[in-house]
Image (tube, rainbow, N blue to C red):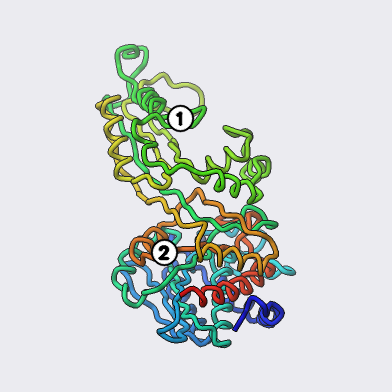
Amino acid sequence: MNVECDLDKVSAYADSQRGEYENNLKKLVDLAGVSMEPDRKSEILKTAAMAVQLLESHGATAKVVETAGYPVVIGEFHSGSENPTVTVYNHLDVQPADGAEWQSPPFEMKIVGDTYLGRGTTDDKGPALAVLYAAAYAHKNGLPINVKFIWELEEEIGSPSFAQFLLDNESALKTNSVVISDTIWVSRERPAIPYGLRGLQGCLFKLKTGAKDVHSGLTGGLARNPIAELCDLIAACFDAKSGEVKIPGFYDDVRAINEAELNNFVASGFDVGSFKKAHELLSTRTEDARDASARIWARPTFEVHGITGGYSGPGVKTIVPHQAEAKISMRLVPDQDPDKIIAALEKFVKAHNKDVEIVKEGTLKPFLGEFTGPYAEAASAAMKTAFKADAAFTREGGSIGAVVSMQETLKVPIVFLGLSLPEHGYHAINENFDWQQARGGIIMFIDYFARLAKIK
Ligand SMILES: [Zn+2]
């Protein structure tokens, strides 16, 4: 089958599936599988059961695999062991949603024209279903490729059981490549293929200098001030105006970004003005699109999320606080190693203020895939087939823990073919998805699978 030349047939297939796609998306969205809320467990389990049923009803094998946390659903369209295998990763758990703020109830999917409104429509149930329809078509039409599915149900809580799941099921998950459909384009006009993710290292700085808050008239000038000392420490760690981190060794392993990458970032349609508007930022550290896109996608950060301690009510209460805590994280980029970074930070903090205690919080490693080579080429060609525009290779500033786990265990190329748009309200109120992206996604994945079938 030469799908690249059979666009009419593939498009007609996508259109013929619209009604069924919408029915199934609604069934999935109406299940409030919020992994962050423990009392939603039964909805998570129902989601897993429905996922198995969806895979089986399209002709795939499927099962629920138990883990220490919520289960993972795996499935496969098998065409023959001599054929290459691609593994599709999506997640079917969703972010919480406070119905009072929404235009319509978040867990009752509403169709308005081409738009699907509801929690999980774009992140990540809509894209997951689009891939399923593409794989079912590829299978029915005898495409020589095996398509495996991994549908996770703990992505929104940081994939706590996923690394172990991969290790426990290594042989069942053997594959030649992975494709993930859980990322966002920069603008509707320009498909984006991210190939890098930032990592994260969180920590708390804690300082205690007394047993209780004391009067500044009695003790001020002599008593130490832990809030001020933490501010001084933070100022030593990084330059708040430029964002430059001053911890020795912090930038040692940062992989340089080349000109081609920077050109791609800007070609994605990234624009500082729209970015500021979208995120309601009054001003930013730069107005330059090249510098700005590199800052959010490919440069590491040091961030202060909050400082607690002392008095925070109205007016001024003249106390000297006795303890303070600063909530810190660093976004890390390839090839920074979180262990090395936290060691450098600890050494720096101890030298600067020996009384500050560092409490290590969550860790996620950065990810770097490829933006050249056969898989990247197949991805960008498939995007062009479906969306009639050249894809831009970008990176994402956030982290997806499952990606690094898959890279470490499966040891194969990982490609991101996302379908979400900035206006889809990822993790926000009134989350939505639309038929144009779903339809394009079905066509894109059929074309992508056809191209992968030729990579031996
Ligand atoms: Zn997601």
Kindly identify the amino acid type of the residue bearing the numbered disc 2. Answer: Glu
At x 66% / y 72%, what residue is drawn? 439
Going from N to C along the chain, the mark reached first, 1 or 2, is 2
Q: Nearer the viewer, residue 345 or 257?
A: 257
Q: Please state if 314 lies on the left or on the right of 73 as rendered.
A: right
Query: What is the crowding at mark 1: few (fewer than 14 residues within 10 Å), some, or many (at least 20)?
Result: few
User: Residue 154, which numbered label?
Assistant: 2
Residue 425 lies, in percent from the top left, at: 61, 56
Label 1 vs label 2: CA separation?
36 Å
- SS label for mark 1: loop
Kindly identify the amino acid type of the residue bearing the numbered disc 1. Answer: Ser
Residue 339 position (above or below residue 247): below
Q: Nearer the viewer, residue 232 or 9?
A: 9
| Residue behind label 2 places its C-beta within 8 angstroms of ligand 1 | no
Residue 208 lies, in percent from the top left, at: 28, 29
- Can you identify the residue that label 1 sits on? 312
Residue 199 lies, in percent from the top left, at: 41, 49
- SS label for mark 2: loop
Disc 1 versus disc 2: nearer the observer: 2
Residue 104 lies, in percent from the top left, at: 65, 63
